[in-house]
Image (cartoon, rainbow, N blue to C red):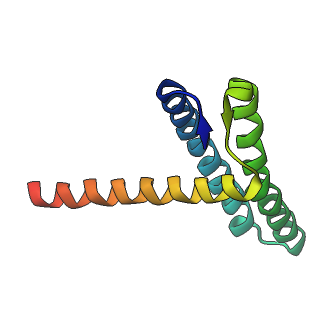
Amino acid sequence: MITESFTTSLAVAVVLKILLEGVLRAKKWATGRFTGAVTPVGKVAGALTLVVVLPGSKIVVLEVVAFVFGDAVSLGGFFLVTALIFGLLLARLSVRRLLMLDATYDA
């Protein structure tokens, strides 16, 4: 991610966090649609939904950041955004596990 100021970087981080939560909800919905399907047509529809949601979410992230910040921010391309989202997911998981670990010591 390339920005010109720390404030812009912070604002991008907040927008990315909000978008990440939306992406996770959409993925959970699509996965539930796939696993909950009982007919072959339902399974195919669920699989197609996942195929659209997973790469589509990265495109949505790129477009929202471009719309909100314009030329002030450059995230790179599709693959860099995918790596960024995986990094955010890993950081989110690490923080949640750390907080869960901390909660076990309080008991």
Q: Quadrant of residue 96?
A: bottom left
Residue that extends furthest to the front in the rendered view of this protein: 4
Residue 93 at x, y = what percent?
Answer: 42, 59
Judged left or right of residue 8, residue 104 is left
Q: Nearer the viewer, residue 24 or 19?
A: 19
Residue 67 at x, y = what percent?
Answer: 76, 27
Judged left or right of residue 83, residue 88 is left
Q: Nearer the viewer, residue 39 or 81?
A: 81
Residue at 9 percent across and 54 percent down: it is 106
Residue that extends furthest to the right in the rendered view of this protein: 41
Residue at 11 percent across and 60 percent down: it is 105
| Quadrant position of the N terminus in the picture | top right
Q: Nearer the viewer, residue 68 or 92?
A: 68
Residue at 79 percent across and 51 percent down: it is 56
Judged left or right of residue 76, residue 2 is left
Residue at 67 percent across and 44 percent down: it is 75
| Quadrant position of the C terminus in the picture | bottom left
Q: Quadrant of residue 82?
A: bottom right
Note whether 43 is above or below 72 in the view shown: below
Question: What count of labels does the image hold?
Answer: 0
Q: Is residue 27 something that shows in the picture?
A: yes
Q: Quadrant of residue 94?
A: bottom left
Residue 76 at x, y = what percent?
Answer: 71, 48
Q: Is residue 107 something that shows in the picture?
A: no
